[in-house]
Structures are given as structure tokens and as C-alpha cells.
Amino acid sequence: MQRDVMNYDILIVGAGPSGLAAAIRLKQLAIEAGRELSVCVLEKGAEVGAHILSGAVIDPIAIEELFPDWKEKGAPLNTPVGEDEFLILGQAKSWSIPHWLMPPLMGNKGNYIVSLGDVCRWLGEQAESLGIEIYAGFAAQEILYNEHQQVVGIITGDMGRDSLGEPTSQFTLGIEIRAQYTLIAEGARGSLTRELENRFNLRKKSSPQKYGLGFKEVWRVSAEQHRTGLVQHSLGWPLDKDTGGGSFTYHYGDQLVSIGFVVHL
């Protein structure tokens, strides 16, 4: 059985915000220069945005640079930050930290509370309208190298194997996708990223890793509990004084709250 082979100028692995933004900007630059540029984006999720649950607070500056008319195009930035609180929690009460004591990066004036999944779906639509090919449901499994040890593409995972990994009657070999340039944008500590870091010693001069354990969920709450536009961060309880970490709570959308908690390890 022979693999199918596809060739592109640019291959991007991962349809998250960075991968899609890179694809869009490269295509825009090619159009401005009057050049043909074939761009392919692979996404392991069943659809663009399927693997991005988190709500987030974002500065719209990057979307503004990509699409100055993003509001007219219907970008899903619908909840401007209205309240911005930073709290220290005790077991029975809380203390608010004044804004003037906080570092500038903790200020969210002019920012928006969004669903990153919705933002990615919108970016995917804009990318396809520019002629970028997006293949969802295809995970990059293996990196391809040439004789000079340069990255020349990837191979997608085989399809049609049973629970023991054996081929079924629906078995199909993964596709070989080759490109002049390959951008790995698979998120934090992805499998291909780790392979490239080890192979090319990319972390030799980088700072040590800092590890944490966290969760994030999206809740729908009652109208009485919902405070549209509220951004709230906290330190303290239930952590003790020797343990770093904290929480975030973002109110947006139709009575939705993005909530998360991180503990430093």
C-alpha cells in the first residue's frame, strides 16, 4: 500500500490562534505581493476550535492588525471587560488589591472576554475565505526529514485500526504532506515539539521549565449570579502561604463563566 503525497509551500500543524494567524498573515502577504502561495493547516480535532475549551481575556490588537474591519466581519469579541478585580482570599473573607498597585499586564481596559474556541472557528472561516486549506481530524504523527536533517513535512496518523492497533478493512495509511516550510503550532509541549527540541537541542539556552497543575471549565450560571464583563483573579485560599497559584473567573456570553485554578508545582 502506497501513501498519498501532498505538496504545499507552507504547512502549519495546529489550528489554534497562532497557527491560524500565521497562515492568514502569510497568505495576506502573498496576495499583496501578487504571488501564489499554497498554505495547508492540519488540526487533530474533529473541527477547528474543538480542542480549545478555555475562555480568555484578549487584547484585540493582533486581530486588528490581521483584519482592521474585524467588527464588520463578525469576530466573536462581544464582551468588553467592564470590571477588573484582583483579590486575596481568606477562608472567610477577601481583600481587594487597588489597581494602582498592580503591574500593567494585569490591567484589562480595552480587552475582551472571549471563547477561544469561537475565536479559532472564526479565524478558520477567514483563513478558508483566503484560499487556505484546513484539514480537521488529521493528527500529525511523524516528522519528515531530508538527507540534510531539515524538516520537509509530516506524516498524518494511520486511520482504520482496531483497539489493538491492527488494521481493519477500513485501514488507510497516513498521508505524507511535504512543504518548503513547516510551522509546528501544536500548543504547549506537543509531541512533535518535544521531538524537535530534543533533536535540535532547542532548549539548550532557554530558562528552566516551570511546572503547574491546573483545570479550566466553562459554567452556565443563573442570571442573578452572572456579571457580564467581570474579570476576577485571586491569590490565597485554599492554598497555604508556601504554595503559589490562584484562580481566574471571567463572565461573558449567555450567562457563561470561564473558571480556572492553577497550583505551582
Image (cartoon, grey):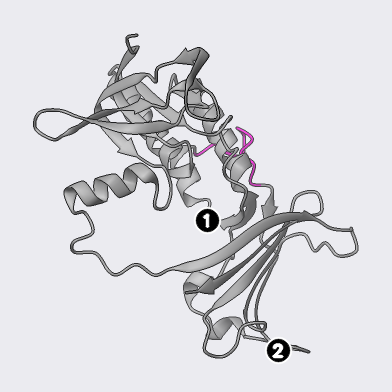
Q: Disc 1 marks which amino acid? A: Asp
Judge from the rendering whether residue 229 lies leftward or rightward of residue 50; answer left or right.
right
Q: Nearer the viewer, residue 135 or 119?
A: 135
Q: Quadrant of the N terminus?
A: top left
Q: Name the secondary structure under disc 1.
A: loop
Q: Identify the residue at image location x=56%, y=27%.
A: 125
Q: Nearer the viewer, mark 1 or mark 2?
A: 2
Q: Name the secondary structure under disc 2.
A: loop
Where residue 210 sits, quadrant-wise, is bottom left
Q: Identify the residue at image location x=49%, y=74%.
A: 264
The Cα–Cα distance between marks 1 and 2, rounded to whole angstroms, is: 31 Å
Q: Identify the residue at image location x=60%, y=88%.
A: 240
The numbered mark, 1 or 2, whose residue comes first in the sequence reads: 1
In the rendered structure, which segment of residues is drawn in magenta? Answer: 68-77
Provide residue 158's location: percent of width, then percent of height: 43, 23
Total numbered labels placed on residues in the image: 2
Provide residue 124's location: percent of width, then percent of height: 53, 31
Q: Disc 2 marks which amino acid? A: Gly
Q: Which residue is mark 1?
A: 59
Judge from the rendering whether residue 234 lies leftward or rightward of residue 64; answer left or right.
right
Q: Which residue is mark 2?
A: 90
Q: Identify the residue at image location x=23%, y=59%.
A: 203
Vertical order, 241 against 211 (above or below): below
In the image, is residue 76 part of the stretch drawn in magenta?
Answer: yes
What secondary structure prevails in the magenta region? loop
How dense is the environment of label 2, judged by Cα within 10 Å: few (below 14), some, or many (20 and up)? some
